[in-house]
Image: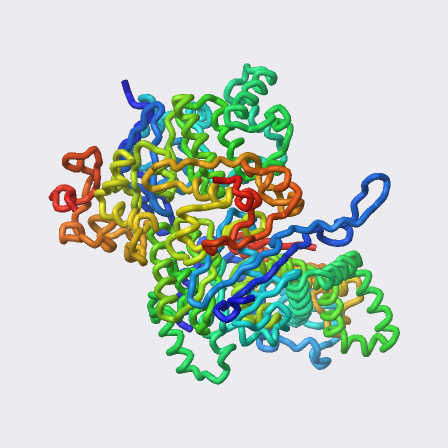
Amino acid sequence: MSRHIDNFKQSYLWYAFKRDKVAIASMIVLCILVFTAVFAPLIATYNPYDPINTDVMNSEIPPLWMEGGDSAFLMGTDAQGRDLFSTMVYGMRISLLIGVGAVVLQSVIGITIGLISGYFGGKLDSFFMRMADVQLSFSYLMVAIFFTAILQAAVGVGRFGEIAIPFLILVIGFSQWPQYARTVRASVLAEKKKEYVEAARVTGFGAGRIMWGHIFPNTLSPILVLSTIQVANAVMSEAALSFLGLGMPISRPSLGSLINSGFEYIFSGAWWITIFPGVLLVVLILSINLLGDFLRDVLNPKLYKG
Amino acid sequence: MSNNEQSLLSVRNLYKRFDISGGLLDQIKFSGGKFSREITLVKALNNVSLEIKQGETFSVVGESGCGKSTLGRTIMGLYPPNSGEIYFNGDRLDQLSPKEMLPYRSRMQMVFQDPYASLNPRKTIKQTLEEPLKYHNPQMNAGELRDRVEEVLLQVGSDPKWVTRMPHEFSGGQRQRISIARALVVDPEFIVADEPISALDVSIQAQILNLLMDAQEQRNLTYLFVAHDLSVVEHISTNVAVMYLGTVCELADTKLLFEDPKHPYTMALLSAIPRLDGKKSERLKLTGEVPTPINLPTGCVFHGRCPYANSRCIAEIPELKTHSDGRKIACHAVEEERIR
Amino acid sequence: MSSLLEVKDLVIKFGLRTGDVTATTGVSFTIEKGEKLGLVGESGAGKSVTGFSIIVLISKPGYVADGHILFKGTDLTKISSEEMRNIRGNRISMIFQDPMMTLNPVLTIGTQMTETLLAHNPKMSMKEASEIALEKLRKVHIPSPEKRLEQYPHEFSGGMRQRIIIAIALITDPEIIIADEPTTALDVTIQAEIMDLISELCETEDMGFILITHDLAVVASVTENIAVMYAGRIVEKGRTRDVIDNPQHPYTKGLIKALPEGAKGSNRLNQIKGMMPTLTNIPDGCAFNPRCPYVMDICKTDEPSLIQVKGMDTQAACFLCKEEVFTNE
C-alpha cells in the first residue's frame, strides 16, 4: 500500500496538482462541501425533517446580520420556518446523493455496453450505438417530465415524495448512459488493437476476462474525467428538475427545490431563501467542474461527448 | 502428406480475406445509374502451404503488407482462416471451438513486435506472468506459481525481484524479455515470433536474438519467425519462406536461399539489403509499385514488377513446385528455365 | 574558406521539472560540399537532437546551451529567427522519418511544393514555381510528374511519398540536406531505391548530406564519413570504411559485432551487456564504462576526449586508443 502512495507521489498527476492553484482550491472547497453533506446531522444546527424544529411563527426570518435576524438562525429561515442553513446542508446531501447515484448507474450501464460494443463490434455494436443515438435525441427533461407526471398520478403526490430519490437517480442515470458507452467504446477500440490484448487471446482467455480484466483497467482515465463532468451534470439536472417542481418535494428539499421554493418570496423581500442555496449550488458545481478540467488537462484522454 | 509425422505444424492451402467495406451503408455504391452492394476484400493470404519441423526456426520474410504477420496470427487462431487447414502435431486446429482450442493454447505461444504495447500497462509483471500460468494450471498453488515465474524470469535474464513493478518502469529490451517470459511461462512447444526485435536498438536486438536461441536450445522449441530484416533471418533460421502479396514465392533451406536465390523477387529482395562491407551487390532493380492486395493481379502476383514476366505469367498462377534440391519455387520463368 | 557546416562543441540541454538534462555534450563535426556524413547511434544517443539543432528547431524545453553551429561562417545559434527562417527549409532542408506526418493530407502535392518556394521567394510567379516543382519531381524519378502535381498524399505509396518529401526538400536548391531516419519506415527494396536516389542527388547537386540513422549497414553503403554517437557524445568519427572495417572505440566494435553480419560463423551474436544509460543518469567518467569489456580504473573517473588514433584518420574517445593497447587487436 505504501508503495502505491509512493508511486502516486512520484506521478505526474500529483506533480501537476501541486502546481495548480485552481485545482487545489477546488479540491479544498469540494472536500469541505462533501464533508458537510456526509456529516450533515452533526453539522446542521437543526434537523429540518423533524416537525418539532419547524414553527410557522419563525418563517422568513432574515439572516443573522440583518435587521430582525435571530441568533438561532444563522442564515435565516425559509417560508415554513425551517433553519435555512440546516435545510441547505441536508439539501446538498440529497443533491449529491442523487448526483453520485445517477453517475454510478450511468457508468455501470454505459461501461458494460461500451465494452461489449467495442470488443465484439459488428451488429451488436451497431445496435447499441444506434440505441445510444436514439437515447440522446430525447431531451432528458422531456423524459423526466413524462415519467414524473405518470408516476405522480399513479402513486399520488404524497407517496411520490418517498420514492423521489431513487426515481430521480433512475431517470438521470438512464438518460445519460450513452456518454459513457461512447467514451468507453472509443477507448476499447484503441486498446483492442494493442498487442497485449492479442497476447491475452493467444493465452486462451475468454472474452469476459479480457474485457473486464485486461481492457477495462486501461480505459479508467477517460472514465474518471468523464465521471467528474457527469456528477456536476447530474447535480445540475436534479436541480433543474426540482426547480420545475418535478423533483424533490418541499418537505425533503434538495438545493433545486429550495431555490424554487424561495422564488415566490423573492419579491416580498425574502431573497435569502433563493440566493443562498443558489450560491451553494454554483460553488459545488464550479468546484467539481474545475477539478474535472484539471483532470482532463493532465490525463488528456480522448473523450467522446454525446 | 508424406512427411506429416515430422512436421510439428503444417499449413495447407490457407486463404485469409479481410472485409474492409464497413457497415451496410458504406457498402452501397452508386454506379451506372443503379445502386449495388460492393464488398471490398483484402486478400491477405492466398493459398499458403508450409510445413514446420520439430525444433527448427522457420522464417517468413517479405515486405510490409505481404501477409507475413497475418500468417502468424492466423496460425495462432487470432484470425479465423477463410479456407485451408492448420495442423499442429497432426491435430487439425482451424475448426476447433475456443474451448477445444484451450489445451493447444499453452503449447503454442506468441511473442509480439512492440514491447510498449504487448504488456498490459495496468498490470504488474507478476500479474502478467502468473495469470496465464494459473489459467492453464488451476491446481498450482501460490508458491508453485511464484517459483515457476521466478525460474522463467531468470531464464530470460530478468531479475525476479522486479515482479512487483509495472511495465512502464522498464526499457524496451527488458519489456521484450518479459514478453518472452510470458510466452515461455506456460511451457510451449511452438512460438510464433512476430518481428520480435524490429522495434529494438541494435545492441539490444543481439541480446534478444541470443535469448531466443538459448531458449530454443534449452526447451527444444520450434519457432515461426516473422521478420523483414533479412540479415537476422539469415543468421537464425533453418528454412525461409519468402512472401509477396499473400503468396509464398520461394521456400528453401536458408543457406540455399541466401546463396543462390532463384525467384526473381527473392533476388531483388536480397540484392537490396544494405551490406556492412559497403559492396553494392548486383542489384536487381524492380520497376513499378506493389499492387494492393484488394485487387490482386491476374496470374503471378509479381508479374507487374518482374523483369522476366511473359504472357504466361500474366494469365496463369504459378504453382509452388518442389525442385530437386528440395526448395520450392512458384515461378514460370524458373520452371521453363528462362532464368539462367 | 570556411567549411559548409561546422558544428563546434555543441551542448544541448533540456529543462525538465527535475532540473536540466544534458542531451548532447561537446558534439563537433564538419561537412563539406558534396560530402555525405552518417550520424549513427541508438535511440536516445542524441543524434536526432543534433540534427534538429542545426536548423534551430529544437522544441521546448530543449535549448542549445553552448557551442557553435557555423553555416558558411555564420553562427546559426546567434542569428535572429527572421534570418534563420531564410536558411531553414531554404538553404538547409530536412527530411523526416514518416512521410505521412510531413505531408499535409488536405493539400495537393503541387500546392505543398510551390508553397515552400513562394514563401522563400515572394516575387516568384505561380507559373515559375510550378515549373521548378515539375523539374524536381522529375529529378526524384517520379513518373508523369504533371499529373502527380494535382494529386493528394494519400494517392501515393510510401516510397513515392518519401520521393516527394525529397523533392520538396530539394525545391529551394539547398546546400545541405539533413535526413532523420529517412528510410526506417520503408521496405528494403524501397530503402535501396531512396538511398540510391539521395546519393545520386548529392553528387549532381553538390549538396552536403547528413544521414541520421541507427542502421550501420545503410551508413556503410551510402556515406563517406561517419560519426558514432553514444549517450550524447561522439565516441568515434572518421571515414566510414575505416570505422566499419577497423573500429577503435569498444562501443563501435560491439555494435558492429552485434549485427548478424558482423558475427558470421558463430551461432550466437556478440552482445553488448546492459543498455545505454538514460540522460538523467549518465555514469561518471566515460559514459560507456559500465558496459565496456575493456574498462580500466581511469574510465570510471575521467571522461575521455576525442583523440586522433595513431596511424589512422579515425578519432575516438577512449583511453585505450591513447595507450595504444587497442589498435593492434
x 85%, y 43%: residue:
B34
Residue A277 lies in what quarter of the image? Answer: bottom right
x 74%, y 61%: residue:
A123
Observer able to see residue A36: no
Residue A50 vertical position relative to residue C233 in the rendered view, above or below? below
Residue extending farthest right: A153
Q: Left of A13 or right of it: where is B75?
A: right
Residue A98 vertical position relative to residue C281 in the rendered view, above or below? below
Q: Left of C229 or right of it: where is B110?
A: right
Query: Residue B5, how many percent across, how many down?
Result: 50, 71
- The foreground one among B292 and A147 is B292
- The foreground one among C217 and C77 is C217
Quarter holding the N terminus of chain B? bottom right
x 54%, y 70%: residue:
B88
State how the image is colored: rainbow
Residue B237 lies in what quarter of the image? Answer: bottom left
Q: Left of A67 or right of it: where is A161?
A: right
Query: Residue A174, how many percent across, how many down?
Result: 74, 67
Q: Left of A90 or right of it: where is C279?
A: left
- The foreground one among C90 and B46 is B46
Residue B267 vertical position relative to residue B99 in the rendered view, above or below? above
Query: Residue B4, how many percent across, how many down?
Result: 53, 68
Query: Residue C204, how many percent across, how many down?
Result: 42, 21
x 61%, y 28%: residue:
C148
How many circles with numbers are drawn on the protein?
Answer: 0
Observer able to see residue C264: yes
